[in-house]
């Protein structure tokens, strides 16, 4: 049934929300508060998710989307890219909506009522557009373009440019697609990364198999695309292989190389928004105050927090499950220790393995080798770290910072931490992902 709907808010999942005359909630993608839209309403009585709507009247938060691949185009959904959700929304309205939805998720799943913790105002991204230094694409074998898929499909969007990518990364995307096709590198997925510090990029190609022919083709790719310094080849069940030099360096604070550098490789986790990442790291350290402490860091990855922690802590034990990430973190730590002289030499110990299992093992250690941590920092993947509260408790950690990219799993884990005696003192949301509903956050726990 066709019906007219007034959009009144944005849901945590990014869709606009309105209610029918009978009070039925309706979630409509690509709408904005204040919009009046016509939607195709499915039968039933519960909350309805409708396909893209026809816009009848524009709300005040609506702006002209700068991208031809985005939005409520006619015919509906024909050209729509699955990358952005909110290019039609003024950036101020985006951060307000994230802050509201985030607090609501903490309340609903974490039972954390506003007022019971210090809710710090969301930190906006320094760049709302062109903020990504890495992204994952698909190679369209017919056109030779690196593409994104349309929403909820595997149909390619023939990108003529992407407003989320740093200009240099977008330019690399444009040339890398045809070069991959010419080199006959049939990658299932292609991750490209750009380093503003190095002025060069690197690629991670997921192939069916890593053969000598694939390596030779990767060499040909590097010869054809001078902006690419190296390639990592990956295949299921096989160790990855580097061709050229795919290790890039980033300034820990963009534009300030003196604030320290950090290695990355395109097959290893790395925050894609370097500007917002600098804010995230600074706010995590400000909340944790690791000065002079023995610190336990779980899920350290390539050492995004490890270097800044080590610069202030007495000692850091850093745990990570992925070998190549740990290798990059070790190289950065060794370099920083050398720069600091003997004083910094033994500040970090890296431990490989499952973060919670290693932490449980540390809690059982006794005698001279055992450590008493004054602070902990954890930054788990999207699925969170169920059970981390009990582990922190076993280790008798008085203060911990939990960094999360998923408000729902964060809220779940904070609630469980509360059940073993931790109090949520403060939470700082950070907008790492403008033009989408996603939000990153840092929470401070004490006991
Ligand atoms: C969100 S990333 C954070 C990495 C790093 N802290 C950063 O800021 O770049 C999560 C990291 O946890 C690692 N990881 C995932 N599951 C793990 C586990 N069970 N044990 C240890 N590390 C794990 C991943 O390899 C990844 O490096």
Image (spheres, grey):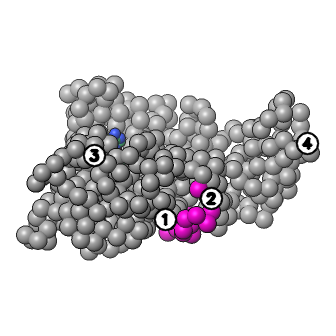
Of marks 4 and 3, which one's residue comes earlier in the chain?
4
Task: Tell which tag, 4 or 3, sits nearer the viewer.
Answer: 3
Of marks 1 and 3, which one's residue comes earlier in the chain?
3
Of marks 3 and 2, which one's residue comes earlier in the chain?
2
Q: Which residue is mark 3?
A: 359
Task: Tell which tag, 1 or 4, sits nearer the viewer.
Answer: 1
Q: Residue furthest right?
A: 21
Q: Which residue is mark 2?
A: 113
* Residue sitting at x 23%, y 26%: 211
- Camera-nearest residue between 139 and 310: 310
Q: Which residue is mark 4?
A: 22
| Residues rendered magenta in the picture | 112-129
Mark 3, other Cα within 10 Å: few <14 / some 14–19 / many ≥20: many
* Residue sitting at x 12%, y 61%: 346
Image marks 1 and 4: residues in contact by CB distance under 8 Å:
no
Of marks 1 and 2, which one's residue comes earlier in the chain?
2
Does residue 121 sit above or below 369 in this rendering? Answer: below
List x then y, in percent, for residue 227.
Answer: 31, 53
Q: From mark 4 to mark 3, how far is it between C-alphas?
A: 53 Å
* Residue sitting at x 49%, y 60%: 424
Q: From mark 1 to mark 3, how far is it between C-alphas?
A: 23 Å
* Residue sitting at x 85%, y 56%: 57
Say left or right for 58 vs 295.
Answer: right
């Amino acid at each position: 049934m066709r019906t007219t709907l007034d959009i009144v808010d944005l849901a945590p999942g990014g869709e606009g929300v309105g209610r029918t005359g009978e009070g039925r909630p309706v979630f409509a993608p690509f709408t904005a508060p204040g919009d009046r839209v016509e939607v195709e309403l499915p039968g039933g009585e519960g909350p309805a998710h409708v396909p893209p709507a026809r816009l009848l009247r524009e709300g005040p938060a609506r702006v002209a989307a700068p991208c031809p691949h985005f939005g409520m185009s006619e015919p509906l959904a024909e050209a729509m890219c699955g990358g952005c959700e909110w290019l039609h929304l003024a950036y101020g309205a985006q951060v307000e909506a994230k802050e509201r939805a985030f607090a609501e998720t903490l309340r609903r799943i974490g039972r954390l009522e506003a007022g019971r913790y210090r809710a710090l105002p969301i930190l906006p991204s320094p760049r709302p557009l062109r903020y990504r230094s890495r992204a994952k694409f698909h190679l369209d074998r017919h056109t030779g373009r690196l593409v994104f898929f349309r929403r909820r499909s595997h149909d390619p969007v023939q990108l003529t440019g992407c407003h989320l990518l740093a200009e240099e990364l977008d330019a690399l995307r444009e040339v890398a697609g045809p070069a991959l096709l010419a080199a006959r590198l049939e990658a299932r997925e292609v991750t490209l990364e750009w380093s503003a510090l190095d002025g060069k990029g690197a690629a991670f190609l997921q192939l069916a198999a890593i053969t000598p022919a694939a390596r030779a083709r990767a060499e040909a790719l590097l010869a054809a695309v001078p902006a690419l310094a190296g390639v990592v080849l990956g295949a299921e069940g096989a160790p990855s292989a580097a061709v050229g030099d795919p290790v890039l360096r980033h300034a820990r604070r963009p534009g300030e190389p003196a604030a320290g550098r950090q290695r990355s490789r395109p097959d290893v986790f790395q925050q894609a928004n370097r500007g917002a990442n600098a804010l995230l790291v600074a706010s995590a350290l400000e909340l944790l105050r690791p000065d002079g402490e023995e610190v336990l860091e779980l899920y350290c990855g390539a050492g995004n927090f490890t270097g800044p922690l080590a610069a202030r802590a007495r000692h850091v034990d850093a745990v990570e499950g992925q070998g190549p990430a740990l290798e990059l973190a070790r190289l950065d730590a060794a370099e920083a220790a050398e720069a600091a002289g003997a004083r910094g030499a033994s500040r970090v110990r890296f431990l490989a393995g499952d973060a919670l299992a290693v932490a449980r093992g540390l809690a059982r250690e006794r005698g001279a080798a055992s450590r008493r941590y004054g602070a902990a920092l954890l930054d788990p993947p999207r699925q969170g770290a169920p059970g981390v509260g009990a582990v922190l408790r076993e280790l008798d950690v008085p203060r911990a910072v939990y960094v999360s990219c998923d408000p729902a799993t964060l809220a779940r884990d904070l609630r469980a931490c509360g059940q073993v005696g931790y109090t949520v003192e403060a939470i700082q949301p950070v907008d790492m992902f403008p033009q989408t509903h996603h939000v990153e956050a840092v929470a401070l726990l004490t006991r």
